[in-house]
Amino acid sequence: MITLVVVVVLAGIAAALLARTVTAAQSISGKAERIATSGRGINVSTDSVVQLSRTNKTALSILDSARPLETQLTGVIDTAGGIDQAARSINSVAGDINASAGAINGSAVSINDSAGRIDGAAARIDVTAGDIDATAVDINRAATNINGVAGRILSEARPINATAGDINTTAARINRTAGTINTVATRINNS
């Protein structure tokens, strides 16, 4: 659960960095267009025009690279929210089933003990004791089935946790990519 919260927080941070990167890239693109417009009278072969052309291409490349990240990040956030809700629901149900299975198992053991004492102490009620013993076995079998269901629920919860870990890894990659884009944009902005 903490991992999912961390994933959501990281996804939010990545979204903020992505938004900053897109804004910076748009600003760089706008500046480059203004410089290109105002510098049309300068000889095309000068360093300023060459630098401006490179800057404009780099800014457009950054902007194009950053656009798909926003969609991916939205998908990661939506998936993380769905997994978090599913994990909470499964954890709640598994806890209830485990509690019920424990209570039923405790009752089955108690009934089985009582059946054994009745059988040993009163041979004349052997038929009745056999019925009680059969009931205890049925209850024990039901408790075993419930424990099996609880185990299957637990085994289904493990892949969900693994998926959450994958989402966390994807969010970290997006964050690194956004950092790289931000570094390139800063270099472009400073040059």
Image (tube, helix red, strand yellow):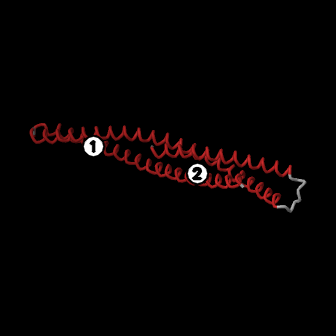
How would you rate the neighbour count of disc 1 (Cα within 10 Å): few for under 14, some for 14-19, many for 20 or more? Answer: many
Q: Amino acid at mark 1?
A: Asn
Q: How many numbered discs?
A: 2
Left or right of residue 34: residue 11: left
Give me the residue at 58% from left, 51% from top.
Answer: 175
Above or below: residue 96 compared with residue 17: above
Residue 73: x percent and y percent? 61, 47
Q: Amino acid at mark 2?
A: Asn
Camera-side residue of 14 and 93 = 14
Residue lying at the far bottom of the rendered structure: 45
Q: Quadrant of residue 147?
A: top left
Camera-side residue of 103 and 136 = 103
Instruction: Identify the image quadrant of the N terminus.
Output: top left
| Residue matched to label 2 | 175
Camera-side residue of 27 and 157 = 27
Give me the residue at 61% from left, 44% from top.
Answer: 16
Say which element carries label 2.
helix
Give the label, 2 or 1, closer to the camera: 2
Camera-side residue of 134 and 178 = 178
Give me the residue at 52% from left, 46% from top.
Answer: 7
Residue 187: x percent and y percent? 68, 55
Instruction: Identify the image quadrant of the C terminus.
Output: bottom right
Q: Earlier in the sequence, mark 2 or mark 1?
A: 1
Give me the residue at 28% from left, 38% from top.
Answer: 103
How would you rate the neighbour count of disc 2 (Cα within 10 Å): few for under 14, some for 14-19, many for 20 or more? Answer: many
| Residue matched to label 1 | 140
Label 2, label 1: how many angstroms apart (C-alpha)?
Answer: 52 Å
Residue 32: x percent and y percent? 79, 51
Residue 62: x percent and y percent? 70, 53
Left or right of residue 177: residue 44: right
Left or right of residue 125: residue 164: right
Left or right of residue 21: residue 161: left
